[in-house]
Image (cartoon, grey):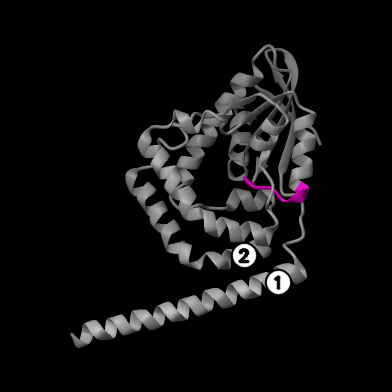
Amino acid sequence: MKIKGKIKKALKWAGIAYASAFLAINAHIIYDYNVNGPKKPELTLQVHNYDVEVQGKHKRLTLVGEIHTHNLEDKKKAEELISSNHFFANECNANTFYEMNVPEKVYLKTLSELGALPSFYYHLGSGREYSNMLRTAYQNKKEVFALETGRSSLEDLSTFQRLATIAMSAVKLPLAPLQYYNGKSEPKLTEEYAREKKILFKEENGTKRSIKMAREIDLLMRHPQIDSLLATTGVYHTYEIIQCLKSNPNLKLEEIK
């Protein structure tokens, strides 16, 4: 009984300490945000323009790597790109979620719920409060071609990998306010940084997804009605997709500076 009482007392003081720290950090966040504001926005979209020779014709491909929420500079560039391109392709479209089976929907919904609070703080600090390319395209009444189906985006993740990802997200949840400072100190996003970035459990799956999306871009570029295509993916896929397209014998890419 004495041990049980000591555990209860320790948990009580731990709860008080956590609540005090939580309130203190949030008080500082409110002060810092009102005095200094979020991180100064800078363009982080990775934009690559190519002249593509396919089936004896020359076509235009604009490949964009993005972080899936935009700051003000990203927002301006995204609107410019979307307004100047008729055909738009993205990792997913409005149908992607509905193409998934029930376990996959539960997995993504769980990750979304666990990540909501940390994402809020990160976006507050980084200034990433604007829609991504997909939502901007829909706001501009664009038709969106999906570069992968809902099933293919998750099919290579094992049950262990999914559970481990959920567990890591759950562990991070109590530390959500610290994401504000991570957002304020977000590193400069360069192609080299994106290329070297490693994501636990997702590297192999990410490479497989990049290959699938590159194949879909190839099919779209060979479509007779498409002369110019804007294709957007997560920034960590961009380099691999470019390498896949360059090694594709059906396409000849020449980068437009």
Label 1 crowding class (10 Å Cα cut-off): few <14, some 14-19, many 20+? few
Residue under the point 57% across and 53% down: 197
Q: Foreground: 129 or 248?
A: 129
Please give left or right for residue 234 compared with residue 170 in the image.
Answer: right
Q: Is 72 contained in the magenta span? A: yes
* Between discs 1 and 2, the one toward the N terminus: 1
Amino acid type of the residue tagged 2 in the rendering: Tyr
Circle 1 sits in a helix, a strand or a loop, which is it?
helix
Residue 180 is tagged as: 2
Residue under the point 45% across and 43% down: 204
Magenta stretch prevailing secondary structure: loop
**Residue 235, x across and y down, in percent:** 62, 44
Q: Are marks 1 and 2 in contact (CB under 8 Å)?
A: yes
The quarter of the picture where residue 124 lies is: bottom right
Please give left or right for residue 9 compared with residue 207 in the image.
Answer: left
Magenta region:
67-73
Amino acid type of the residue tagged 1 in the rendering: Asp
Q: Foreground: 198 or 230?
A: 230
Residue at the bottom extreme?
2
Residue under the point 64% across and 14% down: 223
**Residue 145, x across and y down, in percent:** 61, 25
Residue under the point 60% across and 71% down: 26
**Residue 35, x across and y down, in percent:** 76, 71
The quarter of the picture where residue 181 lies is: bottom right
| Residue on which the image places disc 1 | 32
Residue 120 is tagged as: none
Label 2 crowding class (10 Å Cα cut-off): few <14, some 14-19, many 20+? many
Quarter of the image that includes the C terminus: top right
Quarter of the image that includes the N terminus: bottom left
